[in-house]
Amino acid sequence: MLARVAKLHRQRAEELLTEIGLHVGQEMLLAALQDNDGISQSELADCLMIQPSTVTNSLKRMERAGIVMRRVDSEDQRITRVHITEKGQNLNQAVREQWSRLEDNSFHGFSMEERVLLRRLLIQTYQNLANRR
């Protein structure tokens, strides 16, 4: 059931993000850049715990869309730094609104106690999987 919920949640997230011109995963890149503008591509991959090639592919799309720009580091030509553009800054609010819609849809009919319990259970599930007993 967890796998089915995760799959459907991702589908709904994709639908909502498509409305604002993003693909799933790009919102996480935007959030990371919001807090770390000018971070290197490899640091961005480490921060999000994803493969550098995944970051590169997403950034290419985002750069073509004018959401981010990449620049070679002035002190070390081997490093590419990623900067959020004004368009990217403006998308952050839209992302928050779409995630809020997704959360409202996902937890419609849940009491606050049920939401808190589900969060606790999901955290425990995540920790169990991360620790691989």
Image: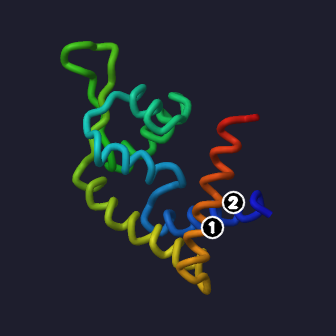
Residue 10: x percent and y percent? 63, 60
Q: Which quarter of the figure is the N terminus placed in?
A: bottom right
- Marks 1 and 2: in contact by CB < 8 Å? no
Q: Residue 57 or 76: which is nearer the viewer? A: 76
Residue at point 42%, 26% (across, down): 42
Drawn side of residue 105 relative to residue 98, left or right: right
Q: Which mark is residue 3?
A: none
Q: Nearer the viewer, residue 37 or 120?
A: 120
Q: Residues within 10 Å of mark 2 (few under 14, many from 20)?
A: few
Q: Residue at x 60, y 82 (%)?
A: 110
Q: Residue 128, percent across and down? A: 69, 44
Is 125 left, or right, of 107 in this rendering? right
> Is residue 99 or residue 15 the one in the foreground?
99
Q: Is residue 2 left or right of residue 61?
A: right
Measured in 3D between alpha carbons, the distance from the residue under mark 2 to the one under mark 1, in whole angstroms, is 14 Å
Q: How is the image coloured?
A: rainbow
| Circle on res. 6 | 2
Quarter holding residue 8 = bottom right
Marks 2 and 1, the one that precedes in the sequence: 2
Q: Quadrant of residue 76?
A: top left
Return the residue at label 1: 118
Q: Is residue 91 above or below residue 49?
A: below
Type of the residue with mark 2: Ala
Q: Secondary structure at mark 1?
A: helix
- Element under label 2? helix
Q: Quadrant of the C terminus?
A: top right
In the orientation shown, which residue stands out farthest toward the left?
Answer: 74
